[in-house]
Image (cartoon, coloured by chain):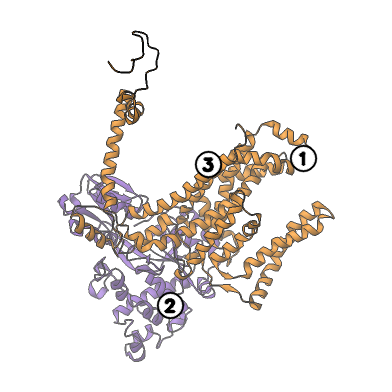
Amino acid sequence: MNRTVFLSTLSIAALAAVAASAATLDDVKSRGELVCGVNPGLTGFAAPDAQGNWSGFDISLCRAVAAAVLGDGNKVRFVPTTAETRFTALASGEVDILARNSTWTFSRDTDLGLDFAGVNYYDGQGFMVKQDLGVTSAKELDGATICIQTGTTTEMNLADYFASNNMSYTPVAIQSNAEGEQQYLAGACDAYTTDVSGLAATRAAFASPNDHIILPEIISKEPLGPATRQGDSQWTDIVRWTLNALVAAEEYGVTSANIEELAASSENPEVRRLLGTEGGLGEMIGLDAEWAKRAISTTGNYGEIFSATVGESTPIGLARGLNAQWTQGGLLYAPPFR
Amino acid sequence: MSDTHAQTVRFVRDSMLPQAAPPAGQAGAVRWLRENLFSGWLNTILTVLGLIAVFFLLRGLVPWFAHSVWNANTLTECREIIAQIWGPDARGACFAVVRDRWQQWLFGFYPAHLYWRPVLALVLLFVALAPVLVPGMSRRLMAVSAIYPFLGFWLLWGGSMWLPVVALLGFVIGWVVWRALRGVSPLLAIIAAVIVPVLWWLLAAAPVDRALSSAIPLGIDAVRSDRFGGFVLSLTIGVAAISLSLPLGIALALGRRSDMFLIKTMSVCFIEFIRGVPLITLLFTASLLLNYFLPPGTSFDIILRVIIMVTLFAAAYIAEVIRGGLAALPRGQYEAADALGLNYFQAQRLIVLPQALKISIPGIVSTFIGLFKDTTLVIFVGLLDPLKGITDAVRASMEWKGIYWEPYIFVGTIFFIFCFGMSRYSMYLERRLKRDNR
C-alpha cells in the first residue's frame, strides 16, 4: 500500500496550529456534514458511480460515523486525497477523518501526529505471477523482474523480503495501479506486487483471470484503518467505537434487518447497551443513546459491509481470512461495550 | 520521317518543337519521392527505417481501432464481443466506457438535470468572447462580455441571484462615483472609484445580499464545488485563470520596466518568486497551507483558491512574455510617443502595448495552452480533473477496472481540440494584425 510520507514535515509543523482548535465533533455538528478523506478510486474500497454516489468498504465506515454523529449516513462530503497529500489534508483540517486504506504504522501514529482509531481491514503484501511462469512460491522468484509502485513502503517490504531470503530482483517502477496492471500484462515484469486485496481485484478484472495466480506468501502486515488528528481524543473515540460497534454487531448477530426488533426485545445486556436501550454509553462520547443503532442500521454490521463491497459474492471475491471475527479464527475483536 | 519538320529546310530548324512530357522519372509522384525521400543513400535508409516504424505502429493500432466496441456495459462484455466477432486472439478498443461514462468526463458529478447550465455557460462564453476576438462584431455585445463573469459564476454554482448582482453593483457604484467626481479632480475620482466599491463589498454587500434574498428570493439550485469535475472543472479554472492572468501579466510587465523603485522591486520579486516555484507547490499551498493562515472556521472555496493560484502562476509567465515584446519594440517608438506629448498611460495604451502585445501573441497563447493543460494537476489537491481524477474513478468501478488507453485517448482528443483551436486562432490573429513588412 502507498505509504509515502511525502510532506510529512509539513504535517508536523501543521499539527501545533490545529491542536489548538481541537473539537472536531463541534465543527462537524455545526457544519452539519462530515468531511471524509478517501481514495479517489480503489475498487471495492472507495469509488464513485456514474451519478457521483460514493460506495465501498472505506466509504461505509464514513457513512457509519456520519450516521452516529449527525443521524444521517448521507451527510458526508467525500474528498479524494492522493497518497502524498492524505495525511497533510487530515492535519490541516481539510478533512475530519481519513478512511483511505492507510496502514497503521509506528511512525505515522507517533511522528506524523495521527491517531489510528482501529483497523477495519487486515491486509498484507503479496505477489501475482502468470500461471505459465511455473512459479508456485515467492521463494522461487530469485532473479525476477517485479513491478512495484514507487515511493511506497511496499517497495521497502519487497527489498526486505528479498534481502532476508538472499535473493535478487530487478524492480520496474510504476506510478499507479492501472499502470502496474498494464506493465504486468504487457510482460514488462514477471511478478506484480501490492496488497493482496488489490491483487485480487486486479486479477478479477483480467481478460483471463485463471492464467494468473496469487502466490501464497504474504510478506508484510498492512493493518488498514481510519485515522484522525492527534489531540482530539473525543473525536478519535467516536470513530474508534463506531468501528467497534460495527464489529460487535456482527459478533452479537445484530444486522440492519433485525436491529429494530433486537433494540426492542433483546435480553442480551451487551446488545442492549450497544443499541442504547440501557447504559447511556452514547453520552460518554458526546452523542445520544442511539448513535450505534443508527450507524448499524445505515450501513449494516461489519460482515454485511464486507460482503456487500469486497466479499465473496462480489467480483472481487475476497475471503474473510484475517478479517473474520475472533470466534471464527480471525482478528476482529471488539472490546466490551460496558 | 514525321510531319513535324515538313516545312523545314534540311539541317536548319526554324520551328519550335512542341513541348514533350518530361521523362517518367522526372515527373509527378516519382520525382517528388526522389527529391524528398530518396535523394541520397542516407535519406533512403532513413526513409526505409521510417516506413518500417510506421508499419509496425499501424499494424498494432489499425486492428485495435478497427475492433472498437461501442456498445457494452462492462469491460468483460467488450472482450466477449471482440472475441466473438474477430476471434479469441483479437484485441480491440473498448470505447463503450466512453459511451457509458462520457457525462462524467465532461461534467464530473454535476447533477444530471442541471447539465444545461454549464453548457449554456460555455455557449455564452463564446458570445462574450466574440466582440473581443472577432473584428466587426457589434460593440453592443460588449455588454454581454462585461456581465459574463457574474452570469457564468451564477450559472455554474447557482444559488441566489443576488450574490452576483450585488458583486456587480460594486463595479457600477465605482463607475458612478468616478463619473460624479471626474469634474472635481481626476485623481480624487480614481481613488474614490477604487475605495468606494471595496467598502461596498466589504461592508454593505453581505447585508444587502441577505436583505434582497429574503425580500425577493430569486435563485436556482446551488451546486457545490465538490460536484465539479472533468472538463467543467478544467474549463472553469482554465477560462477564469486565462482571462484574469492577461491583465495581471500586462500590469506586472509594465511594473517590471517601470522607473519607480518600489513598483519595479515588487514586480520583480513577485515574478521571480512565482516562476521559481513549481505549480504543484502553489496548489498544495492553496489547498493545505492556507488553512493555517485563515481564521478557524473560514472555509474558502477550494476551486476559488486554485483559480487564484493558477492565475498568479500564469500571470508571472505572461509578464515575462510581454516584457519580451516590450523589449523588442524599437526605442524610436517610445521616443515618438514622448515627442507627441503623450503621458505614460496614453503612450502605453496607444503606441507601446498594441505593438508589444502583437509581438507577444505566440508566447501568450503558448502560455495559455500550457495553463489549460496544467489544470489537470488539480488532482493533487483532491479535485477530479478529467485526465487522472475521473479516469481513476471510472477505473475503480468493477465494470471498467482494467481499462487503460481508451479514457486517455478520449480525454486527449478533447484537450487537443481546445488547444489546437487556440493555436489556430493565434495564427489567424497574427496574420490579421500583420501591418508591417507587407
Mark 2 = which residue?
Answer: A67
Say yes or no: labels 2 and 1 on the same chain: no
| Quadrant into which the N terminus of chain A falls | bottom left
Tell me where residue A291 appears, x and y as whole percent: 43, 81
* Residue at image location 37% in from the left, 56% down from the top: A3
Say yes or no: labels 3 and 2 on the same chain: no
Mark 3 = which residue?
Answer: B427
Mark 1 or mark 3, which has the lower sequence index?
1
In this view, the residue in front, A292 or B431, is B431
- Within 10 Å of disc 3 (Cα), the crowding (few <14, some 14-19, many 20+) is some
Tell me where residue B151 appears, x and y as whole percent: 59, 63
Q: Are marks 3 and 2 in contact (CB under 8 Å)?
A: no
* Residue at image location 58% in from the left, 49% down from the top: B134
Amino acid residing under circle 2:
Ala
Instruction: Output the letter for the chain in purple.
Output: A
Q: CA distance from mark 3 to mark 2?
A: 58 Å
Mark 1 = which residue?
Answer: B342
Q: CA distance from mark 1 to mark 3?
A: 32 Å
SS at circle 2 = helix
Between circles 2 and 1, the one closer to the viewer is: 1
The chain letter under disc 3 is B
SS at circle 1 = loop
The chain letter under disc 1 is B
Between circles 1 and 3, the one closer to the viewer is: 3
Above or below, A292 against A34 in this view is below
